[in-house]
Image (cartoon, grey):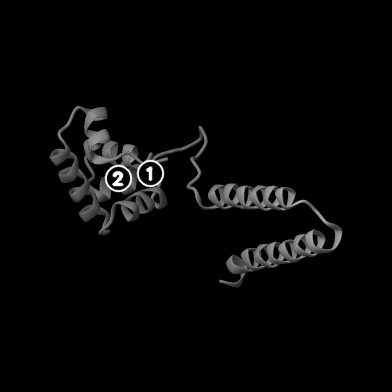
Amino acid sequence: MVRFAAPYAIALAAGAFLLQWLEYRQLSHGLALEAYIAILALAFSAGGAWLGWRLAARRRGPGFVRNEAALASLRLTRQELRVLEILATGQSNKEIGRTLGLSPNTVKTHLANACAKLGVSRRTEAVGRARELDLIP
């Protein structure tokens, strides 16, 4: 837990230090308010981009090999697997249905079956579990 929290704590401390330093500069050296706001906006934009990159699931490269043993033991159908793959891209049930030529209710059924087979209760958990098992890239 410390290994996970330490970089964020250091980044937060550095951000607080930067804000205090900028406030000092603005008060003591007459830095224009617009420059102060621009620096803060850039810092928050960079921090948001970094955090998004850090938290976003990374796709695996061209060397992805599906775990066929796990696929066989879970008895996931090819259609359930395709629904999970498309779900991992962030599409809604309607979008998945359009992509695969299925009704949204059929997509819901496939997702419910896949969730039951993976032993999870949420869509995001299903994608995470499928990635852990190397079922989807």
Q: Which residue is mark 2?
A: 71
Q: Which residue is mark 1?
A: 67
* Residue furthest to the bottom: 2
Q: Secondary structure at mark 1?
A: loop
The image shows residue 2, relative to residue 112, as above or below, that is: below
Mark 2 vs mark 1, CA separation in Å: 6 Å
The image position of residue 25, as x and y in percent, is 81, 60
Residue beneath the point at 83% across and 56% down: 30
Q: Secondary structure at mark 2?
A: helix
* Residue furthest to the right: 29
Q: Amino acid at mark 2?
A: Leu
**Nearer to the camera, 68 or 3:** 3
Q: Is residue 50 left or right of residue 63?
A: right
Marks 2 and 1: CB-CB under 8 Å?
yes
Q: Amino acid at mark 1?
A: Asn
Q: Quadrant of the N terminus?
A: bottom right
Residue 131 tag number = none
The image position of residue 4, as x and y in percent, is 58, 66
**Nearer to the camera, 34 or 58:** 34
The image shows residue 114, relative to residue 24, as above or below, that is: above
**Toward which corner of the image does residue 99 lie, by quadrant?**
top left
Q: Is residue 49 left or right of residue 137?
A: right
Residue beneath the point at 67% across and 62% down: 11
User: How many other residues sit within 10 Å of disc 1, few (<14), some (14-19) or many (≥20)?
Assistant: few
Query: How many numbered discs, if any?
Result: 2
The image position of residue 59, as x and y in percent, is 48, 40
Q: Quadrant of the C terminus?
A: top left
Residue beneath the point at 26% across and 50% down: 73
